[in-house]
Image (tube, rainbow, N blue to C red):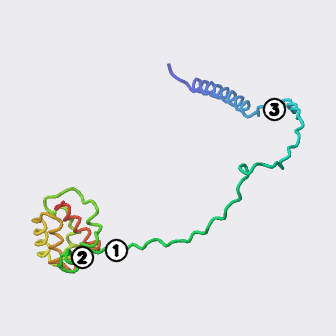
Amino acid sequence: MERTAEIILSEIKECLKAVSEKLSELEALQAVKEEPTPEPEPVQEPEPEPLPVEPVEPVDLDIDLPAEYQAPAPKPTPKQEETPAPIQEEVTPPEEEMPVKGPAVLDVVTRSRAWEIDMPGSPVANILSAISLNDRLLFINTLFKKDPALFQDAVKDFNAMDSLQQALDYIAANFADWNLESDTVYRFMMAVRRKLN
């Protein structure tokens, strides 16, 4: 069956009529929703009647109580003198107990640094695997006087060590000019600790 223009036009008219009816229904629903619903008037409850109040006879409070019932007069509190807190003196160990290896070792003995306290990464078999290429260049240029051979020898020596104390003794003997508080030394020593922990 062939659809002619008249059939299509009649179908469109039917659709428009259906849409128009739905639109009218929606507008009617919208009008119902928009109408304000009257609020219920508040119910007024009757006020309760006041309770009868019986008169109370006045009480004479000027009664002579025996001495045992009399409240004692407050005693003045003595002024307390402020005592200063005791001064705690720092106790330094005798000098014989401290090894004499140079100023770097003395620093290590007397205070701990961040790289001694912070947790290093996972253990490694070779310190070089814990050092990125950028850090290698940084360490060579700042800690090892721009000498790659010195860096390689030091890493080889650190890899052969068994404890952090050996590493500190090695640094004190060979690199006494290092600032053990610097960020560069921190990064290097964290790599060393990954091998020595």
Image x and y of residue 28, in percent: 72, 29
Answer above or below: position of 73 versus 45.
below
The kind of residue on which mark 1 rests is Glu
Residue ID for mark 3: 42
Determine which quarter of the picture holds residue 53: top right
The kind of residue on which mark 3 rests is Pro
Q: Residue at x 77, y 48 (%)?
A: 65
Image x and y of residue 68, in percent: 71, 50
Answer above or below: position of 126 versus 101.
above
Helix, strand or loop status at disc 2: loop
Helix, strand or loop status at disc 1: loop
The kind of residue on which mark 2 rests is Pro
Image x and y of residue 62, in percent: 84, 50
Residue ID for mark 1: 90
Q: Residue at x 34, y 74 (%)?
A: 90
Sequence-wise, the earlier of marks 1 and 3 is 3
Q: Residue at x 24, y 58 (%)?
A: 121
Quarter of the image where the C terminus is located: bottom left
Left or right of residue 146: residue 87:
right
Image x and y of residue 36, in percent: 76, 34
Where residue 94 is drawn, which disc sits there? 2
